């Protein structure tokens, strides 16, 4: 599913002394099946933006189109939009509340009044999609799971709605490196296997650089850059000025280039390894 945002402005507490412009005339398009990283300093407007994409927040002005459908037009119900666009909040495990994992994941489909059979099918496949074993976890209390597992159950609950677009707000926040890598890998698999359009919100360039097709960089309620990771990392100075860095390995490559190595920008350690080996081989041959 494609997403088109047109001149979106959001002002919190408009016309009060607390008025705050959180989004300032934001426009962009995301094509069907793209994997987009949304990055920006705390307070730059990321969460405000994504909550507009499933109708949770209403624009102060501007439009949002999901596959050419204006989601804020009168004839569109929120129920419909939320089946298309799944939003996983920050710390989604705080919203687990049922006594079993099964019931928690089934919550959305039950509300859709689907058949028992369809509900069970969806619960099983969603739990498996996030890399958990259905038989092992279905009857457990979500509260007896590890932090990373709880978060996966919460993500499974969103997937059980079978959305075409999946938006995750800082899904790695507060996890240890192992939990973080597991979640990121799982999200990558979802993109590859299920062909979902994914928006991954993060404040870590390291996390998203190697995963996404394009990055949207937000700064003070506006879009500063929207491009491929490679192109965006050429803007290291601007990124630093707005409180973001580029991945460590990108700095390393840049230093090598300053020292005269003919080496192109790299965004992941794997890529850098290859490039460095090639350069060394080339030098030897010469
Ligand atoms: P991010 O997710 O990038 O950290 P947010 O979208 O949460 O940014 O916030 C953008 C700006 O809007 C911040 O300055 C924040 O303080 C403000 N803000 C967020 N939610 C509210 C709210 N409910 N009422 C008033 N201001 C808010
Ligand atoms: Mg946020």
Image (tube, rainbow, N blue to C red):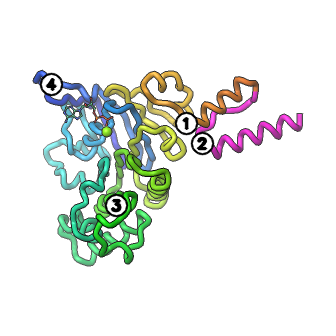
Q: Residues within 10 Å of mark 4 (few under 14, many from 20)?
A: few
Residue 31 can be seen, yes or no: yes
The Cα atoms of the two marked residues, 4 and 2, are separated by 42 Å
Q: Quadrant of ligand 2?
A: top left
Residue at the outermost left position: 16
The Cα atoms of the two marked residues, 3 and 1, are separated by 29 Å
- The disc label shown at residue 198, or none: none
Q: Of the two numbered discs 3 and 1 on the same chain, state the one appearing first in sequence.
A: 3
The residue to which callout 3 is attached is 150
Q: Of the two numbered discs 3 and 4 on the same chain, state the one appearing first in sequence.
A: 4
Residue 183 point in image, percent of width and height: 44, 55
- The disc label shown at residue 268, or none: 2
Q: Nearer the viewer, mark 2 or mark 3?
A: 3
Residue 198 can be seen, yes or no: no
Q: Is residue 33 magenta?
A: no
The residue to which callout 1 is attached is 247
Query: Secondary structure under badge 1?
Result: loop
* Residue at the spot 12% in from the left edge and 21% down from the top edge: 17
Q: Nearer the viewer, residue 90 or 6?
A: 90
Q: Please tell me whether residue 48 is drawn above or below residue 121 in the rendered image.
A: above
The residue to which callout 4 is attached is 18
Q: Of the two numbered discs 1 and 4 on the same chain, state the one appearing first in sequence.
A: 4
Q: Residues within 10 Å of mark 1 (few under 14, many from 20)?
A: many
Residue 10 point in image, percent of width and height: 22, 31
């Amino acid at each position: 599913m494609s997403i088109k945002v047109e001149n979106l402005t959001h002002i919190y507490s408009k016309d009060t002394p607390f008025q705050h412009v959180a989004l300032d005339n934001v426009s962009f398009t995301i094509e069907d099946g793209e994997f987009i990283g949304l990055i920006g300093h705390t307070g730059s407007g990321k969460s405000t933006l994504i909550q507009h994409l499933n109708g949770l927040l209403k624009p102060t002005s501007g439009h949002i189109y999901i596959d050419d459908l204006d989601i804020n037009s009168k004839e569109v119900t929120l129920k419909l939009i939320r089946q298309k666009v799944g939003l996983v909040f920050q710390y989604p495990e705080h919203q687990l509340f049922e006594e079993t994992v099964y019931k928690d994941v089934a919550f959305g489909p039950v509300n859709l009044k689907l058949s028992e059979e369809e509900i069970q099918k969806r619960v099983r496949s969603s739990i498996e999609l996030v890399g958990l074993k259905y038989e092992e976890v279905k009857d457990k209390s979500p509260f007896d799971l590890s932090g990373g597992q709880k978060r996966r159950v919460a993500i499974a609950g969103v997937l059980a709605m079978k959305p075409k677009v999946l938006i995750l707000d800082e899904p790695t926040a507060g996890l240890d490196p192992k939990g973080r890598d597991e979640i990121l890998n799982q999200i990558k698999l979802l993109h590859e296997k299920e062909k979902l359009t994914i928006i991954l919100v993060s404040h870590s360039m390291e996390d998203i650089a190697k995963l996404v097709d394009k990055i949207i960089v937000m700064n003070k309620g506006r879009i500063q850059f929207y491009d491929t990771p490679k192109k965006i990392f050429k803007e290291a100075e601007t990124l630093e000025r707005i409180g973001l860095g580029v991945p460590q390995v990108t700095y390393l490559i840049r230093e090598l280039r300053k020292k005269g190595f003919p080496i192109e920008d790299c965004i992941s350690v794997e890529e850098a390894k290859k490039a460095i080996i090639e350069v060394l081989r080339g030098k030897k041959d010469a």
